[in-house]
Amino acid sequence: MVLAVLSAVLLVAVAVFHLFLFLGFPLGAYSYGGRYEGALPQDKRWLSLVSMMVLILFAIVMILHVRGAAYTTWVLWVITIFMGLNTLGNLFSKSRKERLVMTPLTAVLFVSCLVILLSS
C-alpha cells in the first residue's frame, strides 16, 4: 500500500509538471525529446494537458488497485507497459535534461508498478 501511495504521489507530481508545461512554463527541455528549450508551442501544450489528465487517472487506478477494486489489474498492466516505454523514450532522448530527470522518475514508476502487480 505504501508503494502504491508513493507511486500515486509521483504520478501526480508528473501531472503537475505537465500542468506547468500547459501553462507555458519554460520547461520544454525536460519533455518531448527536448525539442523545445523554453515554453512549449501552443499545440504541444494541449498534449501536456491531456497527459496531465491521463497521469491523474493512472494515480487513481493505482490506489484503487491496491484497495482491491475489481478490473484494475489489466489497467495497471497498461500503466506498467506505458511507464516502461516512457522510460526507454526518456533514456534515448536527445535532451540531457530529460535523460537526467525524467528517465529515473519513469523508471521508478515502472518498477513500482511491476512490484505492485507481482505482489497482488
Image: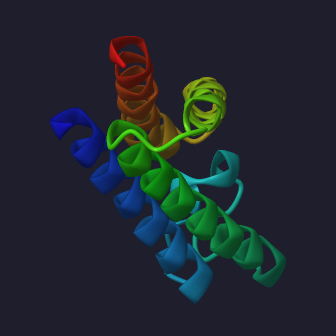
Query: What residue sits 65% from the left and 75% below the top?
Result: 49
Q: Looking at the image, can residue 37 be seen?
A: no
Q: Is residue 10 above or below residue 2?
A: below
Along the horizontal axis of the image, is 51 left or right of 102? right
User: Could you say which is closer to the camera, residue 74 or residue 99?
Assistant: 74
Q: Is residue 108 above or below residue 47?
A: above
- Whole-percent x, y for residue 68 in the image: 39, 39
User: Could you say which is closer to the camera, residue 8 or residue 39?
Assistant: 8
Query: What residue sits 83% from the left and 77% below the top?
Result: 43
Which residue occupies the extreme bottom position in the image? 23
Q: Is residue 42 above or below residue 79?
A: below
User: Could you say which is closer to the camera, residue 9 or residue 60?
Assistant: 60
Query: What residue sits 48% from the left and 34% below the top?
Result: 99
**Residue 111 falls in image quadrant:** top left
**Residue 102 falls in image quadrant:** top left
- Whole-percent x, y for residue 110 in the image: 46, 26
Along the horizontal axis of the image, is 103 left or right of 53? left
- Whole-percent x, y for residue 58 in the image: 52, 51
Query: What residue sits 36% from the left and 49% below the top?
Result: 63
